[in-house]
Every structure is written in structure tokens, then in C-alpha cells.
Amino acid sequence: MTVSSVPGVRLRRVTVNGAGLNVATAGQGPAVLLLHGFPHTWRLWTEVIGPLARRYRVIAPDLRGFGDSDRTTGGHDAGTLAADAAGLLEALDATPAAVVGIDLGVPPAFLLAMRRPGLVRRLVLMESTLGDLPGAEEFLAGGPPWWFGFHAEPGLAETVLTGREEAYVGWFLDRGTLGRGVRADVRAAFIRAYTGTGALRAAFGAYRALPAGARQIREAVAGARLTVPALTIGAHPVGRALERQLRPHADRLTGHVIPDCGHIIPLDRPEALLGLLEPFLGADEDRYGRRGDENVLRRGGPPTPPSP
């Protein structure tokens, strides 16, 4: 285990489901699993890990194919990523966990809760759509975002973008924060993670597996309902599309939209996100572990030392 550049966060290597995952951990208490999207790594959660670690055991992996996790040649579909998440929680003895997914992290987070509900105590899904389930028609009225098709064409995007990664990743970071941008160190970490043909090809594997993920989602909702308490959080541009998709299939669902917030919610509006996450995650935490010393839990107090 190594110390990261983010205070209180440690990095470790965990091999699950045939893939070595780079995993950031911090804090103690009930587990919270954070699943990022594109073009992100675990550093997407930089601004929220510290506050969450005062009350929770935070676990934030780089998904397979992303960041410093293994660049696998396959297994980028939502179902396999969900199995990775389940294996990670079991390997770290961190069940049941609250699971938070954004962007490409949403489908695996959803499938984890559907397929292994005993591992998930609460589910938070942000700024994505769930395959082709009804409800996202308004958001998709002009077709899917242009980069979906670009990334999905085998061999194309990585060939075109090699050598131009900084400008390309930077475009997403600026657009995803409504022009406000992200911290220089976080920006540099994302650019490093997506530099080189191999890194790009591995990341685009998730887009090339979207049809398989859509089929897995349809099968999941055809055979079961989402029974764990769930929260959807929208911003710009997805808004309430995910909430509308999920509502017919969820027993306990709350939906929110954060105003004046870009797609990269944890970096653009971290305080607003924490204002929604903390009460939702804490609603049943007494059932799942020690709350800790109230002097530590007050915002601004020191974080709990990282668990081994």
C-alpha cells in the first residue's frame, strides 16, 4: 500500500475477476464504493473523499482498462464491471456498501445492485443513462452524444487522438464543469491516464461494450426490481433522464438535479453533491457500523486514519 498525493488517501493493488485494480482507500466505518466514468480515474472524487472519510470507509477504484488498473483486452461490459465491483467489495470485506456511480460507472453500479442486492445497502447514480430503457427520449432527442459513436468504432479514436490527448481530455473537463475547469493537479492526472494508444484503446473498450451493457440492463429489469434505496442526481446535460428511466423499476427512489452544475458533479459542485450524499448515505448507517466520535464527524474535523 502506498500514500497518494491526496491527503488521507492510500493506494493499493487488488486483483479481482482476473484484473488487477488500482484502488484508493480512506477512512473507516460503513463502506462507500465510488465508480468513475470517462475521462476520469479515482481522482474524480478528490474533493469529496476527505469529507466522506470522516464517517465512512471510502473505496474508489480505477475501473478495469482505466487509470492504473490493468488494461485488459476485454471485460469492459457493464456486467463484468459489476462483477469486478462485487469482487472488490468481497476482497476488502466491505459489504454491504453504499455504491455511487457516475457516467460510465452508472450501468455497473446498477447491475451490481440488481444482481447482488445483498452487497449494496444504498445506491446513488449520477449523470448517465441506463442503456435504452424508456425515459431518456428528451435527452436523446438529437441522438446520443457524438463521442459515443466515435469511441465505439474499433481502432478509430485511439488512432486519431494519439498525440492529442491533452486537448481532447481537456475539452471534456472544461465542458463537464460549464467552463470552470478543474484543479491543475487533477487535470494533469487525467491527461496522464489517457495518454498513449494503449491507454486510449483500453478506455474506449467501455464504449465498444455499450450494446452488451444495454442488453444486460434490459435482462435485469425484465426479471427483477431494484429493491435497495436509490438516489439519482442529475446536472447538465442529463438532468432527470436517468430518474425517469429508473422510476418504473425501483421500489424506493429519490431524484434530484443540481442547478448550475456540469456533468462532472464531484469536481464542479462537490459541496452541493455532499449536501445530497451525506443525508442519503447516513439514513441507515447505524445498522452497518460504528458512526465514530462525533468530534471527528463534524465537518472540518480531522479525517479518520485510513484503514489497512
Image (spheres, helix red, strand yellow):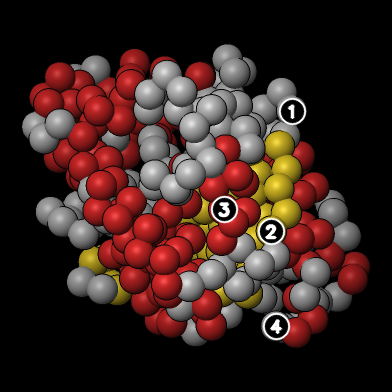
The numbered disc on residue 253 is 2
Task: Mark 1 and mark 3 in contact? Answer it, CB < 8 Å.
Answer: no
Q: Nearer the viewer, mark 1 or mark 3?
A: 3
Q: Residues within 10 Å of mark 2 (few under 14, many from 20)?
A: some
Residue 282 lies left or right of residue 138; in this view the side is right
Instruction: Give SS at disc 1.
Output: loop
Q: Amino acid at mark 2?
A: Leu
Instruction: Report the residue at 34% width, 16% height from top.
Output: 167
Residue 89 is at least partly visible in this image: no
Q: Which residue is mark 1?
A: 259
Instruction: Give SS at disc 2.
Output: strand
Q: Quadrant of residue 264?
A: top right
The CA span between labels 1 and 3 is: 21 Å
Q: Earlier in the sequence, mark 2 or mark 1?
A: 2
Instruction: Report the residue at 76% width, 40% height from top.
Output: 271
Q: Residues within 10 Å of mark 4 (few under 14, many from 20)?
A: some
Residue 40 position, x and y percent, is: 42, 40
Task: Mark 3 and mark 2 in contact? Answer it, CB < 8 Å.
Answer: yes
Residue 43 lies left or right of residue 266; in this view the side is left
Q: Earlier in the sequence, mark 1 or mark 3?
A: 3
Instruction: Give SS at disc 3.
Output: helix
Q: Which residue is mark 4?
A: 288
Q: Which residue is mark 3?
A: 246
The CA span between labels 4 and 2 is: 21 Å
Residue 15 against residue 255 in the figure, above or below: below
Q: Quadrant of residue 77?
A: bottom left
Q: Residues within 10 Å of mark 1 (few under 14, many from 20)?
A: few
The CA span between labels 3 and 2 is: 8 Å
